Image: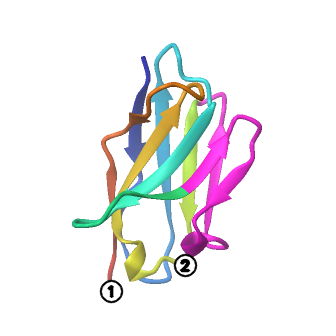
Amino acid sequence: QVQLVESGGGLVQPGGSLRLSCAASGPHFNFYRVGWYRQVPGKEREMVAVIISNGITNYAESVKGRFSISRDIAKKTVYLQMNSLKPEDAAVYYCSTRISASSREYWGQGTQVTVSS
């Protein structure tokens, strides 16, 4: 019903920037709610940023002022611009979406972000 493909991860030095992309496809995708999450081994997956259908965004405290979530509706793509990256931002970043309040969560396969000098 919905497929999500993340891209843009990689290795970056502390203080650097990356832009992640989440390309959506499938007949039911509708930008109802799209979020970026991240996970490191041994820890729970955590919310990084969310954008909902009316454009309102929400961020984890740890990334406020450094990360920005945005979307291109025509391209069915959601972006995560990450600036001033820190070693603690290193994780696998996942894109997820719901198509309604009661729908299941759809997940992408994840993209690795490594922050190291």
Residue ID for mark 1: 117
Looking at the picture, does residue 81 appear above or below residue 55? Answer: below
Q: Quadrant of the N terminus?
A: top left
Query: In this orientation, does residue 58 appear?
Result: yes
Query: In this orientation, does residue 13 appear?
Result: no
- Residue shown at 75%/47% (left/top)? 56
- Residue shown at 60%/72% (left/top)? 61
- Residue shown at 47%/23% (left/top)? 25
Q: Quadrant of the C terminus?
A: bottom left
Residue segment shown in magenta: 49-75
Q: Is residue 51 magenta?
A: yes
Q: Residue furthest bottom?
A: 117
Left of 54 or right of it: where is 19?
Answer: left
* Label 1 CA crowd tier, 10 Å (few <14, some 14–19, many 20+): few
Instruction: Name the amino acid, label 2.
Output: Ser
Q: Residue furthest top?
A: 27
Instruction: Name the amino acid, label 1.
Output: Ser
Under circle 2, the secondary element is loop
Nearer to me, 77 or 34: 34
- Residue shown at 62%/31% (left/top)? 31
Residue ID for mark 2: 84
Under circle 1, the secondary element is loop
Disc with the residue nearer the chain's start (2 vs 1):
2
Q: Is residue 58 magenta?
A: yes
Nearer to me, 87 or 102: 102
